Image (cartoon, rainbow, N blue to C red):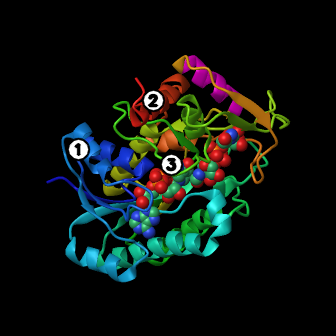
């Protein structure tokens, strides 16, 4: 019988791609999502890709009673992948309590029930935001975390600590925090992808919406950074590569291949690219000319970061495989599909 994996936030951007990879690797999936930042039609599209409709329940994981009721009814879950969280950095500055409540309480509720029902394994969505602007590049998992620049970033740091401390106190629990760098792109089927509400804050969705004519121009935030072309550098990873790492993390836990009960991995490509390189890469990959303009730096942005992926490569046997052009083209194909552009 297939192992049952609970995926919180499974109709969201990274969660939906991970559900596809889990199902294609033979796992059974139950998604919990309150649909606060995703749509129910994602289930149809997952079914179109994989031939299987995941189990689904809609409720808020920060609701203690509803979460307890779910676990009382759903026995046999072997592991949890916890994607569900609010993730808009700017909004978190305006609404810190909403972010702390949602992101911290949902994790606490899950862990309470894991202990109660002896569900050993959890994989947590962390972020390279915990490193802030590192003093040395690239960043390894040993690179010190810095004070968070936003309430959102702080929730990731605190959630890592909650996991670490809870696992230390409960020897039957095992967990992996995956620190994502910048996830971009979409499934090659163009049936699932990122669908930001309102004006996108992230670079690649803004680029694809500009190319699609929804935005007049892309603003490139700053060309006076200490980088080769002056624009800021990040490590952009294809969401399908990222999703595959979750399947490997789950298998590692289920087969007890973990070295310690709590582990942390960087998930990036290992290559830093500037904003202008992404703009040029998009034009090259898609043949679409982008209207862009250099403007002031964006407040709170760091100058440069990219991952040292040696540990993930060696320990997980995982490596990001998709190149930049394929990644940006997949983002464009998704945008075209959503907007009905031929
Ligand atoms: P997303 O918003 O697309 O997906 C999150 C999903 O969780 C959404 O479907 C939302 O409806 C759901 N959700 C939120 N709060 C919930 C709650 N209390 N109960 C039930 N469902 C809830 O975001 P994403 O980009 O797929 O990110 C997934 C995870 O990865 C998040 O934890 C995010 O912080 C983390 N992460 C994302 C990025 C990124 O750039 N996208 C980078 C690093 C880390
Ligand atoms: C990338 C680069 C911008 C938009 C954020 C979160 C981080 C993580 C990933 C979750 C930067 C530049 C952007 C635009 C631009 N999320 N840019 N014009 O800021 O690296 O990280 O998402 O954990 O926590 O902070 O990603 O895509 O917003 O920006 O020039 O219209 O693109 O200045 O240099 P960022 P991003």
Residue reaching furthest left? Answer: 1
Residue 333 % position (x, y): 43, 28
Can you tell which mark lies on residue 330? 2
Q: Is residue 210 left or right of residue 251?
A: right
Q: Residue at x 56, y 29 (%)?
A: 211
Can you tell which mark lies on residue 196? 3
Q: How crowded is mark 3: few (under 14 residues within 10 Å), some or many (20 or more)?
A: some
Q: Residue at x 58, y 25 (%)?
A: 282
181 is higher (above) or lower (below) than 102: above
Name the secondary structure under disc 3. loop
Q: How crowded is mark 1: few (under 14 residues within 10 Å), some or many (20 or more)?
A: some
Of the two numbered discs 2 and 3 on the same chain, state the one appearing first in sequence.
3
Can you tell which mark lies on residue 47? 1
Image quadrant where residue 92 sits = bottom right
In space, the residues marked 3 and 1 are separated at their CA atoms by 22 Å
Query: In the image, is the residue at mark 1 within 8 Å of ligand 1 by its beta carbon?
Result: no
Residues shaded magenta: 275-285
Question: 166 or 291, which lies in front?
Answer: 291
Labels 3 & 1 near each other (Cβ < 8 A): no
**Quadrant hosting ligand 2:** top right
Residue 253 % position (x, y): 36, 56
Residue 310 % position (x, y): 57, 39
Asked if one can make out residue 212 in the rendered structure from this viewpoint, the answer is yes
Name the secondary structure under disc 1. helix
Q: How many labels does the image show?
A: 3
Dominant secondary-structure state across the stretch colored magenta: helix
295 is higher (above) or lower (below) than 141: above
């Amino acid at each position: 019988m297939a192992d049952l994996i609970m995926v919180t936030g499974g109709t969201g951007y990274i969660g939906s791609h991970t559900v596809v990879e889990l199902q294609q690797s033979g796992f059974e999936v139950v998604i919990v999502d309150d649909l606060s930042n995703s749509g129910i039609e994602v289930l149809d599209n997952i079914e179109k890709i994989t031939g299987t409709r995941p189990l689904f329940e809609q409720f808020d994981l920060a609701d203690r009673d509803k979460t307890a009721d779910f676990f009382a009814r759903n026995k046999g879950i072997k592991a949890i992948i916890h994607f569900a969280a609010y993730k808009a950095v700017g909004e978190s500055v305006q609404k810190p309590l909403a972010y702390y409540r949602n992101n911290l309480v949902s994790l606490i509720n899950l862990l309470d029930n894991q202990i109660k029902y002896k569900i050993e394994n959890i994989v947590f969505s962390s972020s390279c935001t915990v490193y802030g602007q590192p003093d040395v590049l690239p960043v390894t998992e040993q690179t010190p975390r810095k004070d968070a620049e936003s309430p959102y970033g702080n929730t990731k740091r605190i959630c890592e600590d909650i996991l670490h401390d809870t696992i230390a106190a409960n020897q039957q629990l095992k967990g992996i925090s995956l620190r994502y760098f910048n996830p971009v792109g979409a499934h090659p089927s163009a049936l699932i992808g990122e669908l930001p509400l309102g004006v996108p804050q992230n670079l690649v969705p803004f680029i694809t919406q500009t190319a699609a004519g929804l935005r007049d121009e892309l603003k490139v935030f700053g060309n006076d950074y200490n980088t080769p072309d002056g624009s800021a550098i990040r490590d952009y990873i294809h969401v399908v590569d990222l999703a595959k790492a979750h399947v490997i993390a789950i298998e590692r836990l289920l087969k007890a291949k973990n070295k310690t009960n709590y582990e942390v991995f960087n998930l990036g490509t290992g290559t830093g690219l500037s904003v202008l390189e992404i703009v040029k890469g998009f034009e090259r990959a898609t043949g679409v000319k982008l209207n862009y303009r250099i403007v002031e730096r964006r407040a709170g942005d760091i100058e440069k970061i990219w991952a040292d992926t040696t540990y993930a490569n060696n320990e997980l046997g995982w490596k990001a495989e998709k190149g930049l052009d394929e990644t940006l083209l997949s983002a464009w194909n998704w945008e075209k599909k959503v907007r009905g552009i031929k």
